[in-house]
Amino acid sequence: MKKHLFLLMAGLVLSLAAHAQQKGRQPNILIIVSDDHAYQAISAYGGDKLMETPNIDRIAGEGALFNKAYVTNSICGPSRAVILTGKYSHKNGFRDNENSSFDGSQNTFVKELRKGGYQTAWVGKWHLETDPQGFDYWQILPGQGHYYNPDFLMMDGSRKRIEGYVANVTADVAEEWLERRDKEKPFCLVIGHKATHRTWIPDTADMGMFDEVTFPIPETFHDGYENREAARVQEMSVARDLIMGYDLKMFPDYDSIRDGNITRMNAAQRAKFKAYYKPIYEDLQARNLTGKELGEWKFQRYMRDYLATAASMDRSIGRTLDYLDRNRLTGNTIVIYVSDQGFFLGEHGWFDKRFMYEESFRTPMMMRYPGVVKPGTVSDDFVMNLDIAPTMLDAAGVAIPPDMQGESMLPLLTERNAKGRDAMYYHYYENGEHAVSPHFGIKTKRYKLIRFYKRVESWELYDLQKDPRELDNLYGKKGYEKLTANLKKQLDGLISRYEDGDARQILLHQ
Ligand code: CA
């Protein structure tokens, strides 16, 4: 029996290797993971065109744009753990940012690539608490990292502070590694960008770049959260929860700021910071805004800073793409751009993420794979961050471990008759910052069913075709009994498939 299995596995490995060989050498892999970057803020996705992101758009234009890419758990650390392992949070153990630390001894796609002959590195934001394992090189930001003069944790246990702005510094560190890598081997490099994470401090070169723009107030900005208990109790409101002396950089005295994000700036950076923000503070004082006007003022400030950090990151990505061009690596390098989740840019009145609502559940994702994925491809299949690990192994001709829960996305892009998922499963666990209730649920092509638990006990049901903004909770309404029962059955099937024992217990005890 064992021998039979071995032969079967060996055959599989050989056929995968042949598959990769047919396409030429094993491709290099570059994965760029940003933090909290909303698809609404990427010009390749059209929409309101809040800003231009030419470099991120270039990846999509020369490869595939995923219109329906989603995450399994919309928050920073957990998403990175999913990307690495190809497994849901309950399997990889990193459920939330507050209590989890990543068990680095477990398998990852990077370890599999390394066994398959790849040279591997991760630079920039990591956010998994424990030191990276399975990399030939790493140089990571501690925790959330800093926008200015960031410290890096080095492999030898030391800390190194690098003067400059984080997007530029991260691109430098990535290039330095690409320069000194073993050029005989294919590489897998992950670049973790800090942008566009809170508290959105722009590069001095970008401060004020959107000051002439008044961003449209989202239709749902003044949402009253009727019939949606979990949405009502959250603490991530732009108008109420953004902190003046932190998120919005409004200080009564710019010479006595104690916020460590600001005090770490050098004298020149600090002077520019003051020169930009102090007049805004003074103007705000003079205008004496309250209520709705103050909320909308905060929204404009939030958008201007957020998008300015995105601009620095987009430029930095352009530099990395240029490096590949200059070194004739573009033709044999897969480039993926993905955010660790989506983000609310004022929809429902919010900043932040976490909810299974579209803006945070859906993430920007694009992939360039010259010679394999046709430029200008647009995919409407359901794909997830869970799929990145198996996709990279598939591309490298390395066997996908059977316990990975994602699926290779390559057939969806290269085979006419390939069929993607009918439905996606989601589970968010954190029950702390921003007071978002834990929840799990299912999204099908048309509907979404969510079960909130722990903080709020409730169900929500949306018809995304009739109500794409998810304002009308249909759960329990007359006429939806049969649909609800069917969706619960499908949800149950996914819980079984992914072996989510926690969710199973909650459903059993409802
Ligand atoms: Ca994040």
Image (cartoon, rainbow, N blue to C red):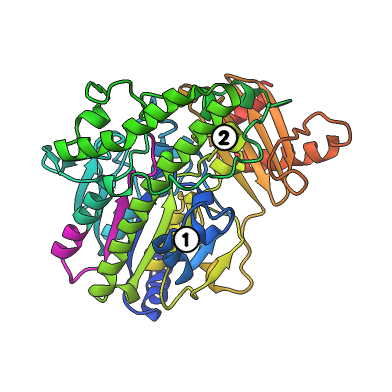
Q: What residue is shown with label 2?
A: 355
In front: 252, or 168?
Answer: 252
Whether the residue under disc 2 has CB within 8 Å of ligand 1? no
Q: Nearer the viewer, residue 292 or 416?
A: 292
- Which residue appears at 65% of the width and 37% of the height? 220
Residue with the most extreme front position: 286
In the displayed structure, 314 sits above or below 273; it is below
Res 366 label: 1
Q: Which span is picked out in magenta?
A: 175-198
The three-letter amino acid code for the residue at tag 2 is Phe
Q: Quadrant of the N terminus?
A: bottom left
On screen, residue 244 versus residue 231, left or right, reads: left
**With 284 as the anchor, is 501 left or right in this view?**
right
Q: Circle 1: is it few (<14), some (14-19), or many (20+) Cα within 10 Å?
A: many
On-image quarter of the C terminus: top right
Q: Residue furthest right?
A: 479
**Residue for point 34% across, 52% down:** 313
Question: In x, y percent, where is residue 400?
Answer: 42, 58
Pointer 2 local density, CA inside 10 Å: few below 14, some 14–19, many at least 20: many
For the question of whether residue 247 can be seen, the reply is no
Mark 2 lies on a secondary structure that is loop
Expressed as whole percent of the image width and height from the top left, the position of residue 323 reads: 25, 67
Expressed as whole percent of the image width and height from the top left, the position of residue 370 reads 41, 75
In the figure, 357 relative to 67: above or below? above
Residue at coordinates 55% horizontally, 36% vertically from top-left?
A: 427
Q: Is residue 256 above or below residue 377?
A: above
All told, the count of numbered labels is: 2
Q: Position of residue 183 (x, y in %)?
A: 17, 70
